[in-house]
Amino acid sequence: MIAVRDLRFAYSGGFSLDVPVLDIDGGERVAVIGPSGSGKTTLLNLVSGIKVPEAGSVSLDGQDISILPDRSRRRVRAATIGFVFQEFALVDYLTAEGNVLYPYRIGAGLRLDQAARNRARDLLSRFGLGEKMQRRPAQLSQGERQRVAIARALVTRPKVILADEATGNLDPANKAAALDLLFDQAAETGAALLCVTHDHELLPRFDRVIDFADLRTPA
């Protein structure tokens, strides 16, 4: 589902990222670990098409998105990827429910019907936010905003789920619930799940754990 080949990206400040090979199958749950500043978030941005590599390719479900123009990458991202951002990236003026349904506002191929609304409400309820669906982000705690962001990533039943420290702001009970939802989604739809995490206690739950230092080392 995810195939990276000879990927290279560099920032103007001198930091560069090289990933020779990364393959993740549909339904596979993969965690990436490594020190802060090593490029793990950059990797997620490249896999999602938010950033474009200087060289190499990123393919999602057989389609090389690294050669697509920006508008096409956005379309693929909306239709294919659920992304849990480290800083949540919630829309301040929307309610929790509105934020979960936001992908349907920006995804031309996504249909906002009653089934989608029901799924959004179900996800929020499973996260203990059933009574807070109409609250805006400023009225939610940091952990609650994190849960809204995870629900938003899952609502479209994406083929690829990318999570950047998705459980970093959650207490143990909600951390377990978040992982359960992420794993259930991967199992239910055959989605590839790629999670960046610093929480080593979670690693035994994943199918595979990749040390980012090894990922960046050519074979």
Image (tube, rainbow, N blue to C red):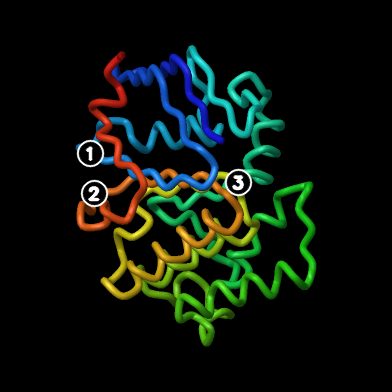
Residue 8's x, y, as percent? 41, 16
- Residue where numbered disc 2 is placed: 198
Amino acid type, callout 2: His
- 71 relative to 131 in the view: left or right: right
Callout 3: SS: loop
Question: Badge 2 local density, few (<14 within 10 Å), some, or many (20+)?
Answer: some
185 in relation to 25, above or below: below
Residue 171: which quarter of the image? bottom left
Q: Label 2, label 1: how many angstroms apart (C-alpha)?
A: 9 Å
Q: Identify the residue at image location x=42%, y=66%.
A: 180
Amino acid type, callout 1: Ser
Q: Identify the residue at image location x=48%, y=30%.
A: 46
Which residue is nearer to you in this view: 104 or 203? 203
Callout 2: SS: loop
Amino acid type, callout 3: Lys
Q: Label 1, label 3: how many angstroms apart (C-alpha)?
A: 27 Å
- Residue where numbered disc 3 is placed: 159
- Residue where numbered disc 1 is placed: 36
Callout 1: SS: loop
Q: Are marks 2 and 1 in contact (CB under 8 Å)?
A: yes
Q: Label 3, label 2: how many angstroms apart (C-alpha)?
A: 24 Å
In primary-sequence order, the first of circles 3 and 2 is 3
